[in-house]
Protein backbone atom coordinates (compact mmCIF):
# COMPACT_ATOMS: atom_id res chain seq x y z
CA UNK A 1 0.00 0.00 0.00
CA UNK A 2 1.95 2.97 -1.24
CA UNK A 3 1.19 6.49 -2.28
CA UNK A 4 2.68 8.13 -5.28
CA UNK A 5 5.39 10.44 -3.92
CA UNK A 6 4.19 13.54 -5.75
CA UNK A 7 0.56 12.98 -4.77
CA UNK A 8 1.51 12.16 -1.18
CA UNK A 9 3.49 15.37 -0.78
CA UNK A 10 0.84 17.44 -2.56
CA UNK A 11 -1.98 15.85 -0.55
CA UNK A 12 -0.19 16.50 2.75
CA UNK A 13 0.50 20.12 1.84
CA UNK A 14 -3.01 20.62 0.50
CA UNK A 15 -4.50 19.13 3.66
CA UNK A 16 -2.40 21.37 5.87
CA UNK A 17 -3.02 24.44 3.76
CA UNK A 18 -6.74 23.67 3.50
CA UNK A 19 -7.10 23.38 7.28
CA UNK A 20 -5.15 26.61 7.66
CA UNK A 21 -7.45 28.33 5.15
CA UNK A 22 -4.59 29.05 2.74
CA UNK A 23 -5.97 27.11 -0.21
CA UNK A 24 -9.38 26.36 -1.69
CA UNK A 25 -11.19 23.15 -0.73
CA UNK A 26 -9.88 21.15 -3.67
CA UNK A 27 -6.21 21.83 -3.55
CA UNK A 28 -4.54 20.17 -6.53
CA UNK A 29 -7.38 18.67 -8.53
CA UNK A 30 -5.83 15.75 -10.39
CA UNK A 31 -2.22 16.86 -10.01
CA UNK A 32 0.56 14.38 -10.60
CA UNK A 33 0.14 11.07 -12.45
CA UNK A 34 -3.24 10.11 -11.04
CA UNK A 35 -5.91 8.67 -13.38
CA UNK A 36 -8.49 10.85 -11.58
CA UNK A 37 -9.48 14.40 -12.38
CA UNK A 38 -12.00 16.38 -10.37
CA UNK A 39 -13.79 19.08 -12.32
CA UNK A 40 -15.94 21.74 -10.67
CA UNK A 41 -19.01 22.88 -12.61
CA UNK A 42 -20.43 24.96 -9.74
CA UNK A 43 -20.43 24.89 -5.92
CA UNK A 44 -22.64 21.82 -5.79
CA UNK A 45 -21.77 19.94 -8.97
CA UNK A 46 -18.46 18.19 -9.64
CA UNK A 47 -17.32 15.41 -11.92
CA UNK A 48 -14.72 12.83 -10.95
CA UNK A 49 -13.69 11.92 -14.49
CA UNK A 50 -17.14 10.94 -15.84
CA UNK A 51 -18.79 10.25 -12.44
CA UNK A 52 -21.30 12.95 -11.49
CA UNK A 53 -21.06 14.25 -7.91
CA UNK A 54 -24.04 16.56 -7.26
CA UNK A 55 -22.68 17.73 -3.89
CA UNK A 56 -20.24 20.31 -2.56
CA UNK A 57 -16.74 18.80 -2.35
CA UNK A 58 -14.35 19.76 0.45
CA UNK A 59 -11.41 17.36 -0.10
CA UNK A 60 -9.88 15.27 -2.89
CA UNK A 61 -7.00 12.81 -2.52
CA UNK A 62 -5.64 9.79 -4.36
CA UNK A 63 -3.66 6.74 -3.29
CA UNK A 64 -3.93 2.99 -2.90
CA UNK A 65 -6.50 2.53 -0.13
CA UNK A 66 -7.52 -1.08 -0.74
CA UNK A 67 -4.02 -2.51 -1.28
CA UNK A 68 -4.51 -3.69 -4.86
CA UNK A 69 -1.58 -1.64 -6.20
CA UNK A 70 -3.78 0.87 -8.06
CA UNK A 71 -4.66 4.40 -7.04
CA UNK A 72 -8.11 5.01 -5.64
CA UNK A 73 -9.82 8.40 -5.36
CA UNK A 74 -11.09 9.71 -2.03
CA UNK A 75 -13.62 12.51 -2.31
CA UNK A 76 -15.06 14.38 0.65
CA UNK A 77 -18.62 15.53 -0.06
CA UNK A 78 -21.19 17.42 1.99
CA UNK A 79 -24.62 15.79 1.95
CA UNK A 80 -27.33 14.21 4.08
CA UNK A 81 -27.80 10.42 4.06
CA UNK A 82 -30.72 8.16 4.74
CA UNK A 83 -29.28 7.15 8.13
CA UNK A 84 -27.92 10.61 9.01
CA UNK A 85 -30.39 13.11 7.52
CA UNK A 86 -28.47 16.23 8.60
CA UNK A 87 -25.96 17.58 6.09
CA UNK A 88 -22.49 16.49 7.01
CA UNK A 89 -19.07 15.71 5.63
CA UNK A 90 -18.95 12.24 4.08
CA UNK A 91 -16.20 10.19 2.46
CA UNK A 92 -16.64 8.57 -0.94
CA UNK A 93 -13.98 6.20 -2.31
CA UNK A 94 -13.72 5.32 -6.00
CA UNK A 95 -11.63 2.94 -8.11
CA UNK A 96 -10.88 2.55 -11.82
CA UNK A 97 -12.49 -0.36 -13.63
CA UNK A 98 -12.17 -0.75 -17.38
CA UNK A 99 -11.10 2.88 -17.65
CA UNK A 100 -14.21 4.08 -15.83
CA UNK A 101 -14.64 5.48 -12.33
CA UNK A 102 -16.68 3.16 -10.12
CA UNK A 103 -17.65 3.49 -6.45
CA UNK A 104 -15.71 1.40 -3.97
CA UNK A 105 -17.45 2.85 -0.90
CA UNK A 106 -20.03 5.63 -0.55
CA UNK A 107 -19.95 6.11 3.19
CA UNK A 108 -22.41 7.80 5.44
CA UNK A 109 -20.13 7.79 8.48
CA UNK A 110 -16.80 6.61 9.89
CA UNK A 111 -16.82 6.94 13.70
CA UNK A 112 -17.54 10.45 14.90
CA UNK A 113 -18.65 13.48 12.89
CA UNK A 114 -16.12 13.78 10.05
CA UNK A 115 -14.21 17.06 9.98
CA UNK A 116 -11.47 16.12 7.50
CA UNK A 117 -9.48 13.18 6.13
CA UNK A 118 -6.21 12.49 4.36
CA UNK A 119 -4.09 9.53 3.33
CA UNK A 120 -1.09 8.53 5.40
CA UNK A 121 0.93 5.42 4.59
CA UNK A 122 -1.97 3.76 2.75
CA UNK A 123 -4.45 4.41 5.55
CA UNK A 124 -7.26 6.89 5.86
CA UNK A 125 -6.46 9.34 8.65
CA UNK A 126 -9.56 11.10 9.92
CA UNK A 127 -10.19 14.12 12.10
CA UNK A 128 -13.56 13.56 13.78
CA UNK A 129 -15.67 15.42 16.31
CA UNK A 130 -16.87 13.18 19.12
CA UNK A 131 -18.73 15.69 21.29
CA UNK A 132 -18.96 19.39 22.10
CA UNK A 133 -15.41 20.75 21.66
CA UNK A 134 -13.98 17.19 21.71
CA UNK A 135 -12.12 15.59 18.82
CA UNK A 136 -10.17 12.50 17.84
CA UNK A 137 -7.78 11.49 15.11
CA UNK A 138 -8.21 7.90 13.93
CA UNK A 139 -6.76 5.68 11.24
CA UNK A 140 -8.70 3.26 9.06
CA UNK A 141 -7.39 0.49 6.84
CA UNK A 142 -9.33 -1.44 4.22
CA UNK A 143 -11.27 -4.64 4.81
CA UNK A 144 -13.19 -6.41 2.05
CA UNK A 145 -15.53 -3.60 0.98
CA UNK A 146 -15.18 -0.75 3.47
CA UNK A 147 -12.83 1.15 5.76
CA UNK A 148 -12.05 -0.65 9.02
CA UNK A 149 -10.96 1.10 12.21
CA UNK A 150 -7.31 0.37 13.02
CA UNK A 151 -6.25 2.76 15.77
CA UNK A 152 -6.75 6.02 17.57
CA UNK A 153 -3.90 8.44 17.05
CA UNK A 154 -5.38 10.69 19.75
CA UNK A 155 -8.75 10.72 21.55
CA UNK A 156 -10.72 13.22 23.59
CA UNK A 157 -8.72 16.33 22.74
CA UNK A 158 -9.38 19.91 21.65
CA UNK A 159 -9.51 21.00 18.01
CA UNK A 160 -6.10 22.71 17.96
CA UNK A 161 -4.29 19.63 19.25
CA UNK A 162 -6.32 17.32 16.98
CA UNK A 163 -5.40 19.41 13.90
CA UNK A 164 -1.72 19.39 14.83
CA UNK A 165 -1.68 15.60 15.24
CA UNK A 166 -3.86 15.08 12.13
CA UNK A 167 -1.22 16.84 10.04
CA UNK A 168 1.82 14.88 11.33
Image: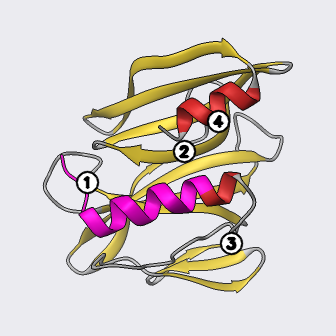
Residue 87 locus on image (x, y percent) = 81, 47
Residue at horizontal 44%, vertical 82%?
Answer: 49
Q: Which residues are magenta?
A: 1-16
User: Horizontal placement of 51 versus 164: left or right?
Assistant: left
- State which tag comes first along the sequence, 4 or 1: 1
- Magenta includes 138? no
Do the residues under discs 3 and 4 have CB atoms within 8 angstroms?
no
Q: Quick one: label 1, few (<14), some, or many (20+) residues within 10 Å?
A: many
User: Horizontal placement of 122 versus 70: left or right?
Assistant: right
The residue to which callout 2 is attached is: 117
Residue 52 locus on image (x, y percent) = 56, 77
The image shows residue 87, relative to residue 57, as above or below, that is: above
- State which tag comes first along the sequence, 3 or 4: 3
Residue at horizontal 54%, vertical 35%?
Answer: 166
Label 4 secondary element: helix
The residue to which callout 3 is attached is: 54
The residue to which callout 4 is attached is: 163
The residue to which callout 1 is attached is: 64
User: Alpha carbon of mark 4 to alpha carbon of mark 1: how far?
Assistant: 24 Å
Amino acid sequence: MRLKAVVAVATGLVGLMGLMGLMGPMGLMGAGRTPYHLRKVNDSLYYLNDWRLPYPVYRFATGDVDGDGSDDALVGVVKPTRFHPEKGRRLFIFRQSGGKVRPLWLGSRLGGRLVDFRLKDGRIRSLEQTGPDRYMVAEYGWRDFCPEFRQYVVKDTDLTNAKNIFNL
